[in-house]
Amino acid sequence: MKKRIFWVLLLGACLAAIFFFSSQNYYQTNNTSGKISMVIVQIAKDVGAVPAGSSTAYQAVNVCIRKIAHFTIFFLLGVNISMIVWTFGHLSNSKRLVISLAAGFICACGDEFHQRFVMARTSSFRDVCIDTAGVLLAVFIVRSVEHRKHSSYPGKG
């Protein structure tokens, strides 16, 4: 029960972070990702990987940073959801997988729906897919770890 409460609290924190980031308008989020993008592009220019006058490199890196951020926060959400669902021992593994993925997908849809109401933000099915991919990876990693912990395999005394 204590584990479940811990994971529920982390889930709440993760959902709050997603809501906070989604509440920022495009210019605010672009400012955050833009700082990271500028550092990456400058390093790439310094090592000669990008021509000095290239403006498209910054735009491409910035889009990647933004999508990686989507994937990462929803990966963390997926870990939290999966850990909560895994505390319900009476569910079959397939039900745990379906519930975890469905919950993550619903959160991704809700996030994009929320962004429709934020100034200078849009909702995107592509972002729902990226978010859900983060959840999917988390669910399968958690499932693999949990399966390994509870099954017999060579080397497990």
Image (tube, rainbow, N blue to C red):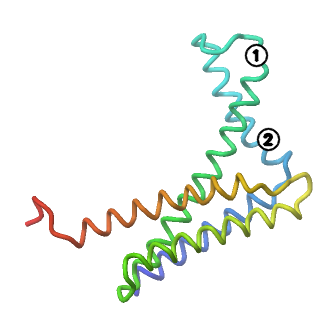
Give the x, y percent position of residue 155: 10, 59
Front tag of 1 and 2: 1
Disc 2 marks a residue whose amino acid type is: Asn
In the picture, the disc for residue 77 is none
Q: Residues within 10 Å of mark 2 (few under 14, many from 20)?
A: few
Give the x, y percent position of residue 79: 48, 65
Q: Residue at x 79, y 41 (%)?
A: 31
Q: Using the image as rendered, state which of residue 94 and residue 76 is in the foreground.
A: 94
Q: Residue at x 25, y 65 (%)?
A: 148
Furthest toward the right, the residue is: 119
Q: Residue at x 29, y 68 (%)?
A: 147
Tell me the quarter of the image containing the C terminus.
Answer: bottom left
The Cα atoms of the two marked residues, 1 and 2, are separated by: 19 Å
How many numbered circles does the render carry?
2
The residue tagged with tag 2: helix, strand or loop? helix
| Residue occupied by mark 2 | 31
| Residue occupied by mark 1 | 54
Q: Is residue 88 above or below residue 124?
A: below
The residue tagged with tag 1: helix, strand or loop? loop
Chain-order first, disc 1 or disc 2: 2
